[in-house]
Amino acid sequence: MILADKIVKLRKRNGWSQEELANKIDVSRQAVSKWESASAIPSLEKILQLSELFGVTSDYLLKDEIEDEEFVDNTNDLEIKRISIEEANHYIEQRKLASWRIAVATFLCIISPITLFILGAATTIQNVVINDTLAVIIGFIVLFALILCAIPIYIYCGFKNAPYAFLEKSVPFELEYGVSGILREKIKANRNRYIISNIIASCLCVFSPIPLILTAFTENELIVMIMLGVTMLVAGIGVFIFLVVGIQNASMQKLLKEGDYTLEEKRKTAIKEPIAFVYWVIIIAIYLAWSFLTDNWHITWLVFAIGGVLFPALMAICNIFIDKKNKDK
């Protein structure tokens, strides 16, 4: 039996389509089709991946004279978890609930400084019966209260997601037969909602600075801070929508190991996450230092806008270096 026939036999035994097998070893469906029609031969690296995936020896795959399957002993290897349709549906439902909770928590964090900004500006207005100290105290109480409401939500969502944390890591898992087809139907059914929601969220975020831009025609600090609050509120709604639809769509992509959740992308994410963490810590440090040293809170928020613009560029540079490093191996 030649290699092509062995690949077909083993693939069908596992109940995988050509596309599913291709996703598991990071190749195109066309490549698998060529292997199975004997018009192309997998590289040695892919032969080793196939042998590990199918649980057979590489000799069995490569040597035509070996007809009987030679299975490898995987008892010491990490057991590959198989996910049933019930487990997949439970995970998707759990992430659907989490998407709303995380979106609410993030929205609370975004709007938390608004009271501080407005009350701080109100102290500059005559006939306003509030002094600087009281304004700061009330502002910080509201800020910390909203953040303290958000933190338990994040912790709770993380706790609920813990049993499925392996989906975000380079841990091997497989979907049982038929699950991938059902998930793709779900994605297809939600595609229009996903696209429309992202368009609305993008418009809200892009146009959110308009109220603040209009304050260029006034020197009233209270109006400026109110418009800043409106900007943060509108942007917060945009982020809220992004998170709800994004987390729900990502839950299905994680199960299918598609998009940002292929094995290769997960490896990239593991490298980029520490870089992203350090980047945003630096951005926050710059914001706080500039704000407290200059007391220009109505301007210093631009640090986050600039940081948000530069962040995708930083991640793109990281991807280039990671890809280059992988090619050099």
Image (tube, rainbow, N blue to C red):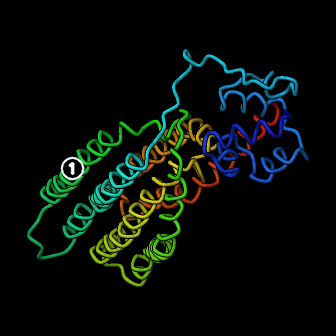
Between 267 and 26, the one nearer to me in the picture: 26
- Residue under the point 54% across and 53% down: 180
Image coordinates for residue 195, horizontal then vertical, percent: 51, 73
Q: Residue at x 30, y 56 (%)?
A: 97
Q: How many labels, in total?
A: 1
In screen coordinates, is 24 left or right of 296?
Answer: right
Residue 131 appears at what percent x and percent y? 13, 62
Check the image and report above or below for 112 versus 261.
below
Q: Residues within 10 Å of mark 1 (few under 14, many from 20)?
A: some
Residue most toward the left?
A: 129
Give left or right: position of 316 versus 254: right
In the image, residue 152 lies at what x, y percent?
23, 44
- The kind of residue on which mark 1 rests is Phe
Per the image, label 1 sits on a secondary structure element best described as helix
- Give the image quarter of residue 108: bottom left
Q: Which residue is mark 1?
A: 144
| Res 23 visible | yes
Determine whether 148 is above or below 63 in the image. Answer: below
| Residue 321 location, quadrant | top right
Can see residue 293? no
Please state if 22 lies on the left or on the right of 161 as rendered. Answer: right
- Camera-side residue: 262 or 59? 59
Work out which quarter of the rendered image holds the C terminus and state it.
top right
Residue 121: x %, y % from top left: 25, 68
Q: Nearer the viewer, residue 242 or 255?
A: 255
Figure quadrant of the N terminus:
top right
The foreground one among 51 and 258 is 51
